[in-house]
Image: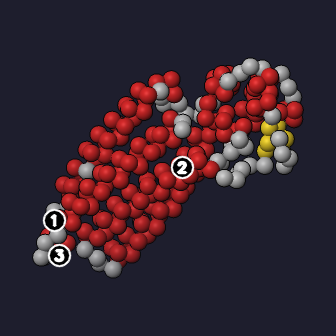
């Protein structure tokens, strides 16, 4: 597995753990008054901390195991990254359009914000997953 | 798993003849060892520039290293 493939895997794990925690924490805040009462705003920023910590530690570990290949990036890595970004771009576009319709339909801010956030996270997950598929299957 | 490219090559054979490891060839042409492995397995078609560099390392013309639509 190349350094970039391992890096992609680390980012997928970091995203899954951080936003898994976000989802569980958010569910714990749901009260009797509906989503309008949920103070989700601080969580949106706080979740970045575990994301960065896991990603940083993960990259230090994979670099330590093979220092010679740390940060190596060649034309195949760039082509795989480009194709992954295309998939991620589709996901984020769908979420953006969904959010637009949600705003026009006057949904709660909570739902519009989370549709956008879900789009961003799912786009990163789709991008990373597709990259791993391409590393395994070939380009 | 199937090969996603129809570009086949003789890199493994030529590398063995020249006594080079995948890592050594990779270092000479400026890609990762995993990319050389992917090219050898026809899981990745290199750019024209990398293809020429590979042929240059082996001192062969491009068409002696790579072919299209045939089994290597």
Against A115, is A86 above or below? above
The residue that disc 1 covers is: A29
Secondary structure state at the residue bearing disc 3 = loop
Q: From the viewer's perspective, is A44 left or right of B64?
A: left
Asked if residue B52 shows in the view, the reply is: no
Q: Residue at x 59, y 47 (%)?
A: A136
Instruction: Return the disc, 3 or 1, that comes first in the chain's sequence.
Output: 1
Q: Is residue B42 above or below residue B30?
A: below
The residue where tag 2 is placed is: A131
Circle 3 residue: A34
Q: Are circles 2 and 1 on residues that touch, CB within 8 Å? A: no
Instruction: Write down the chain letter for disc 3.
Output: A
- Residue at position x 83%, y 22% in the image: B59
In percent of width and height, residue A130 lies at: 53, 54
Check disc 1 and report its element: helix, strand or loop.
helix
User: Horizontally, is A98 left or right of B54 in the view?
Assistant: left
Q: Residue at x 27, y 45 (%)?
A: A50
Residue A79 in percent (x, y) is at 61, 44
Q: Quadrant of the N terminus of chain A?
A: top right
Which is more N-terminal, label 3 or label 2? 3
Q: Residue at 37% of width from left, 31% of height from top?
A: A60
Q: CA distance from mark 2 to mark 3?
A: 38 Å
Residue A30 image position (x, y, % from top left): 17, 69
| Number of numbered labels in the structure image | 3
Whole-percent x, y for residue B71 in the image: 83, 45
């Amino acid at each position: 597995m190349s350094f970039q493939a391992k890096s992609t895997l680390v980012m997928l794990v970091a995203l899954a753990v951080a936003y898994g925690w976000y989802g569980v924490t958010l569910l714990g805040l749901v009260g009797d008054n509906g989503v309008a009462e949920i103070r989700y705003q601080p969580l949106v920023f706080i979740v970045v901390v575990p994301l960065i910590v896991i990603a940083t530690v993960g990259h230090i570990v994979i670099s330590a195991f093979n220092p010679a290949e740390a940060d190596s990036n060649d034309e195949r890595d760039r082509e795989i990254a480009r194709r992954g970004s295309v998939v991620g771009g589709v996901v984020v576009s769908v979420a953006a359009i969904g959010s637009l319709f949600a705003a026009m339909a006057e949904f709660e801010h909570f739902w519009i914000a989370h549709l956008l956030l879900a789009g961003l996270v799912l786009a990163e997950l789709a991008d990373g997953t597709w990259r791993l598929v391409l590393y395994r299957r070939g380009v | 798993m199937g090969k996603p490219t129809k570009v086949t090559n003789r890199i493994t054979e030529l590398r063995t003849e020249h006594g080079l490891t995948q890592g050594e060839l990779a270092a000479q042409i400026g890609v990762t060892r995993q990319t050389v492995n992917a090219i050898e397995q026809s899981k990745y078609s290199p750019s024209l520039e990398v293809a020429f560099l590979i042929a240059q390392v082996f001192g062969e013309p491009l068409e002696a290293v790579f072919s299209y639509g045939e089994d290597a």
